Image (cartoon, helix red, strand yellow):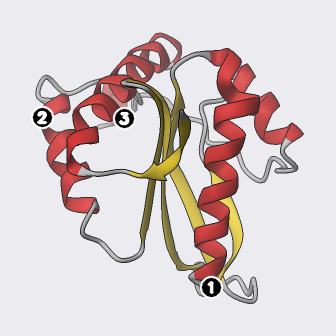
Amino acid sequence: MSKVRFIIPDDVRDIVALSDIKRTQYATYQPLFWNKAQDGVERQTAYFLHLLNEPNMIMLCHYTANTLNGFIIASVAPAPPVYDIGGLNCMVDDFCVRDETLWSSVGQQLLDEAMRHARSKGAVQVVVVTGHHHKQKRDFLQNAGLSLASEWYTSAIPDELK
């Protein structure tokens, strides 16, 4: 049986492994921004274990038997003070599925459950971060009713500008 549930410490190893695969894929599109630290797996493991104890975090996963199908990590906090959204903001920065075909099923379940928990904490808006190149995830987010709000552009700063 598979379902969405809260992440527990024993899940973190699988979640970091999936995240590392996705980070490697993202690095092929933008190698500077997504450049992996040599000890990135260890750092991310410690960071995710730390987040499990933070009350503003929503950390969910989806397993079938012993196979991780996906996860979502969101934080609920006030929007920047220059914006009046009428409540708190739910920011999703880490959101992965094992296979691109799982966005409409597992991805939707994870997003819906994260938004349910965020709403119960006072959130009125969800913001999901994704790489521009990640077409399947972008299509899923648009089909789920989210709209593009911002784009980030990045580049190395040339040495001659020192």
> In this orientation, which residue lies closer to the viewer: 25 or 50?
50
Alpha carbon of mark 3 to alpha carbon of mark 1: how far? 45 Å
Residue at image mark 1: 122
Q: How would you rate the neighbour count of disc 2 (Cα within 10 Å): few for under 14, some for 14-19, many for 20 or more? A: few
Q: Earlier in the sequence, mark 1 or mark 2?
A: 2
Q: Which residue does the image show at 19% across and 27% down from the upper left?
A: 37
Can residue 32 be seen in this snapshot?
Answer: no
Alpha carbon of mark 1 to alpha carbon of mark 2: how far? 33 Å
Can residue 102 be seen in this snapshot?
Answer: yes
Mark 2: which secondary structure? helix
Residue 49 in percent (x, y) is at 20, 53
Say which amino acid is labelled 2.
Answer: Glu
Which quadrant holds the N terminus? top right
Q: Earlier in the sequence, mark 3 or mark 2?
A: 2
Say which amino acid is labelled 3.
Answer: Leu
Say which amino acid is labelled 1.
Answer: Gly
Q: Are marks 1 and 2 in contact (CB under 8 Å)?
A: no
Which quadrant holds the C terminus? top left
> In this orientation, which residue lies closer to the viewer: 120 or 161?
120
Please say if 88 is above or below 93.
Answer: below
Residue at image mark 3: 161
Residue at image mark 2: 42
Please say if 104 is above or below 81.
Answer: above
Q: Which residue does the image show at 72% across and 32% down from the upper left?
A: 105
Residue 103 in percent (x, y) is at 69, 28
Q: Earlier in the sequence, mark 3 or mark 1?
A: 1
